[in-house]
Image (cartoon, rainbow, N blue to C red):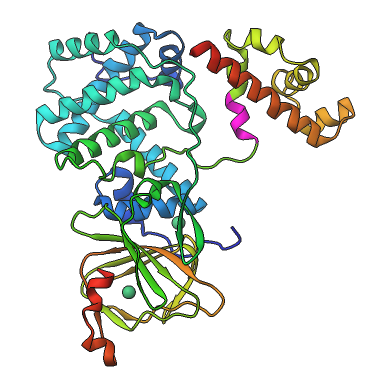
Amino acid sequence: MTISAEPHIRSGQWEDALTFVAVNADKAAYAELFSYFAPRLKAFGMKMFGNEQQALEMVQDTMLNVWKKASLFDASRGCASTWIFTIARNVRFDMLRKKQSRKDDISADDLWADGDYPEQEDSSSDKWETMLLSEKLAPHFDSLPPAQRLVMQKVYLEEKSHQEVSDELDIPLGTVKSRIRLALDRLREALDDTRS
Amino acid sequence: MTHAVKYHPGMMLMEQYVEGTLSADVALAVATHIDLCPHCQRLCQDLHNDHGSQLAQLEPALSHNETEFEQMLAFITEQAPQQKPVKRVQGEMVTVTINNREFKIPRALSRMAQQHGKWLQLGGIATAKLPAGDKLHVSLLYINKGTEVPNHTHLGMELTLVLSGRICDENGEYGAGDLLINSPDDTHTPHTKADEDCLCLSVLSAPLKFNKGLVRLLNPLQQFFY
Ligand SMILES: [Zn+2]
Ligand SMILES: [Zn+2]
């Protein structure tokens, strides 16, 4: 493995690598991330713990989370390095707290929502946009009732606003919203079924 | 929320919160404030981005051992990645009921608030301990309408985060999201107005000392707040 001492980082490189890890469990993309971040996380850990063994434990836990949870990474909320920093910070926090081994203790999960603040009404559907295109959803998309499918197609594939769809189809805005909601519920359910 | 948050944690608290070096009890109050404060949510995101790029620009540790990292990499990629999509469980809204009133609890505090101890009531004031405390005492503090907390001096630090309603003292008025920090030796008389009660998160590092009249003789009140 080569450790890049003088990194020439293409912008978006790590974000792309995380996407490959998330989508295909791509080991090559992950190895790139690992060889860049692991030595830097170790330097960070040495600064925080002043102890090599704990620093390495932190590196391993952090990089394991990066591998396992890559699908939770959301580039619209910040870059890959920010996401990896928050994981390392949380791992370190919980490592320090665990010594006191109390179940009801404050944990990193309590303290850092990682940007997951209550969102505006429409933004939760943004995540679905990418999901819709994925293979898993395509067949379920086709089996939606035609009226719902039409609205979903205009909003998610043609990227029209709810208002535009309402004007174009000559149906009330509330109907557009409720069809989207119903369709999303159906798709979620269909996904749950395929997983269980 | 019509009330704009006016009292925020200082920059140093925010920095330490983001770094994860703030003591857990104080961090809990800061995290809860952030849940209630869009301004600090943005600030917090900026600080996280800073730390992210600092991490990316860090000199890699020189003392690393190739084999060690290779073994680590091999171990990690043998593990099964989490199946997506991960459905984000929109946690049920946690509420706390006191004086027949139901209060919504912000996300950061919800797990702790569910484990609150028995409410102890004295006049218009009630407190319930949270199991969070290390060295600090963390509790929910409810103050009914038109109630005054007797004038007191802090022997240590007092952090009060208004979760709901409104409270006033000699220095100002505080609404949901506002964070008041009192240092040792600060003296004040918090009270609610006639038409609005108040639920707070209180973090104390030392007992309060009550200053006036009969209450002074009753300094056992300390036990009640602390
Ligand atoms: Zn704030
Ligand atoms: Zn006070």
User: Where are the magenta residues, as a range?
Assistant: A122-127
Residue A126 within the magenta-colored segment of the rendering: yes
Given residues B95 and B178, the one toward you in this image is: B95
Examine the rendered structure and indicate whether residue A68 appears above or below residue B208: above
Q: Position of residue B89 (x, y in %)?
A: 48, 32
Residue drawn at (62%, 21%) of the image: A129
Residue A100 within the magenta-colored segment of the rendering: no
Given residues B152 and A24, the one toward you in this image is: B152
Residue drawn at (15%, 12%) of the image: B66
Examine the rendered structure and indicate whether residue B172 appears above or below residue A84: below
Would residue B183 be visible to someone looking at this image? Answer: no
Q: Main secondary structure of the magenta part?
A: helix
Examine the rendered structure and indicate whether residue A126 appears above or below residue B168: above
Query: Residue A190 falls in which quadrant of the image?
Result: top right
Query: Residue A65 falls in which quadrant of the image?
Result: top left
Residue drawn at (51%, 51%) of the image: B38
Given residues B207 and B56, the one toward you in this image is: B207
Q: Quadrant of the N terminus of chain B?
A: bottom right
Q: Quadrant of the C terminus of chain B?
A: bottom left
